Each structure stands twice: as structure tokens, then as C-alpha cells.
Image (cartoon, helix red, strand yellow):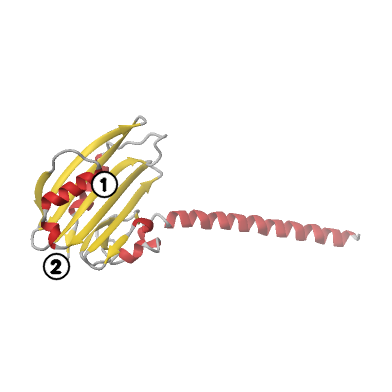
Amino acid sequence: MKKSMLLGLIFSVLLIGGCGMSLDRAENQRADDNNTLEKDANNDEFTKDFLKSSEEVEEGFYLFESMTKGFTLLFPKDAYVEKGTYEKNGNGFESVAFLEESEETNTSLYYSFTYENSSRSSDIELNLHLLSNNANYEGGFEKFTHNENTYYFAEKVSEGNGTKTYWYYAYIHSNSQDKGTSFIGRIACKDSSKECNLDSPELEEKMMKVIKSIDFVQG
């Protein structure tokens, strides 16, 4: 083989190899970018259908509107709706859960709302009984009012495998309509085999901010 042809072949191999390495780096960068994007609720196809706008209404929160159009609430920017658990029956019933996880702090916040638009929502005793059964909770509820709604609220801490889990329960009823929602929330370590600081006040503050943000739409 002539020397010029050999040099050309070597150059071509190096060029192709270089392009291959560049493509690998590009693919890795796109994967990193996608992982970053997926942390924003607007980049989850199912979740963004619930968001009133792509603009934050408060720092770190979007405005969530239920598919029944029955209620709105503040939705954490990094959370996503769990599509597989979502249920809706006309405009009278809706069950929606969303999850917010952080690799950095190894924390997981879970929020679950079950909404009902019917006269049964005004039967507080019945709804607290159903909530307690669903949550396997035995205990009382604290009653308070906030933003035209009455809250029946409880919390507990459970321990297992050397880690704590913080649980929050609420039945929230509109003071002016036959609308209500049951709530179950959880703060836990994302990976129970690793350390995480669940006693951080910011975690409970965020949980309570979401719970207290619920607004039942008139009509």
C-alpha cells in the first residue's frame, strides 16, 4: 500500500473515532440535560396537563387545577403526578397523588388527595372514619379553619428499619359548598439505606403549605 494511502486511511480512522467520541459526549450531555429537565413538573407530559400555567405563582410552586375543575392548590415545582394511580368519575370524584423526590437530600414527599363533590362530603364523622381506615390511623383530629375551609388534621411518626417516617392526615371541607377532600401525606427517606435529615423544618413547612393551599372552586 502506498504511504499516502496509508496515511489517508489512518487519518480517516482517527476522524471517525473522534466523531464517535464527540457523539458519545453529546449523548451523555443530552442525558444529563434530560435528567435535569425531568425535575421540573412542566416537563412531565401527564403532570403539565394539571398546571394552569408554565409560570410559577410562587417561588418553587405552580398552580395545580384538578381535572374535575373542583379545586386548585400549590404544586411543588419538582413534583410529578403519579399517572398510574389517578382516578376520576365525572365531576364528582377525583383521586390524585404526586411525588417529590430529591437525590441531593435523599428525601421523598408524597401527597395524595381524594376529592368529592356531593352531599356526603358534609358528613364529617363518616369521612374521618373512612380516612382513618384508609390510613390505618387510630387517634383524634385537630379542627381549625383556614381560607374558607374547615380542616380536621392529624399527624404521627412511625419507625422501621432504623428510620422514621412522618405521616400527615387531613379532611378538608368547604365552608360554603358540598365539597371536600381527604389527604394523606408522607415524608420519608428516598433511600432508607442512606442517611437523610427528616427533621428539617423546611420539609414540614412545604407539606403544610400544600395542604393549606387547597381552594375549592365555586360552582
Q: Quadrant of residue 173?
A: bottom left
Asked if residue 206 shows in the view, the reply is no
**Residue at the image point whose x is 39% and y is 54% from the top:** 39
Q: Which mark is residue 218?
A: 2
Q: Amino acid at mark 2?
A: Gln
Label 1: how many Cα within 10 Å (few below 14, some 14–19, many 20+): many
Q: Which mark is residue 185?
A: 1
Asked if residue 98 shows in the view, the reply is yes
Point out the image quarter for the C terminus: bottom left
x and y percentages locating residue 211 in the rendered image: 20, 51
- In screen coordinates, is 33 left or right of 124? right
**Residue at the image point whose x is 23% and y is 52% from the top:** 210
Q: Residue lying at the far top in this picture: please name it.
A: 162
Report helix, strand or loop for mark 1: strand
x and y percentages locating residue 38 in the rendered image: 42, 56
Report helix, strand or loop for mark 2: loop
Q: Is residue 219 above or below residue 25?
A: below
Label 2: how many Cα within 10 Å (few below 14, some 14–19, many 20+): few
Q: Is residue 201 above or below residue 25?
A: above
- In screen coordinates, is 102 left or right of 68? right
**Residue at the image point whose x is 37% and y is 63% from the top:** 46
Q: Quadrant of residue 186?
A: top left
